[in-house]
Image (cartoon, rainbow, N blue to C red):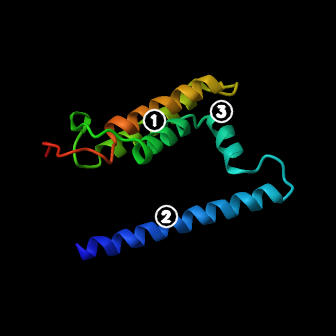
Amino acid sequence: MEMIEEYREIVVGIMIFFAIAYVVIEVILNLNGVKEDTSNIILLKASQGKLFFIPFALGAIMGHLFLGTGDSSYQMSKSMYPVLILFGLAILSIGIAYLLKLKKPVPIWFLSILLGLGLLYGHLFWSMNYTEAVLP
């Protein structure tokens, strides 16, 4: 049990470091005088282009980290399947975007739907809160 607590402290320390680094970078980007160079603007423009999987992925990560059902009937397995499915959907969406040769930006309402679907996916199928599952 001691080993787990040591790893927990390391992981929390890494997460705190990245959170502080992100805030510092955002402050620098807001103060540098260049218009529209913060991460949220860059992600929005990329999502409206050919990378419209970004809202789904962000929603899935939010559902995974901050929501998460405790009902183990939604659990796919104790392996990496939910993450592999997420990467597969990202690759599929990039392929679709290049095949469609999008000329106009993807509308915000569509990106919002993708964000909601990702949140649902992360909440149900990629939860960190499953109770005693009977899966292999």
Q: Tag 1: Cα neighbours inside 10 Å, few (<14), some, or many (≥20)?
A: many
Q: Quadrant of residue 52?
A: top right
Residue highlighted by disc 3: 48
Q: Tag 2: Cα neighbours inside 10 Å, few (<14), some, or many (≥20)?
A: few
Q: Earlier in the sequence, mark 2 or mark 3?
A: 2
Task: Estimate the x, y position of residue 107 in percent, counting from the top left.
Answer: 65, 24
At 83% from the left edge and 59% from the top edge, which residue is drawn?
32
Q: Is residue 40 left or right of residue 54?
A: right
Residue 49 in view, yes or no = no
At 31% from the left edge and 72% from the top edge, which residue is drawn?
5
At 34% from the left edge and 71% from the top edge, which residue is drawn?
7
Q: Earlier in the sequence, mark 3 or mark 1?
A: 3
Residue highlighted by disc 1: 119
> For the N terminus, which image quadrant?
bottom left
Label 3, label 1: how far apart the Cα atoms are: 19 Å
> Nearer the viewer's eye, disc 3 or disc 1?
1
Vertical placement of residue 87 versus 7, above or below: above
Q: Quadrant of residue 83?
A: top left
> Nearer the viewer's eye, disc 2 or disc 3?
2
Residue highlighted by disc 2: 15
Q: Give, as a three-letter code, the residue at label 3.
A: Gln
Q: Give, as a three-letter code, the residue at label 1.
A: Leu
Task: Estimate the x, y position of residue 70 in percent, counting from the top left.
Answer: 28, 40
Element assignment for label 3: helix
Vertical placement of residue 134 versus 48, above or below: below
Task: Estimate the x, y position of residue 4 in percent, counting from the top left.
Answer: 28, 70
At 34% from the left edge and 35% from the top edge, which residue is drawn?
124
Q: Is residue 64 left or right of residue 101?
A: left
The foreground one among 65 and 78 is: 65
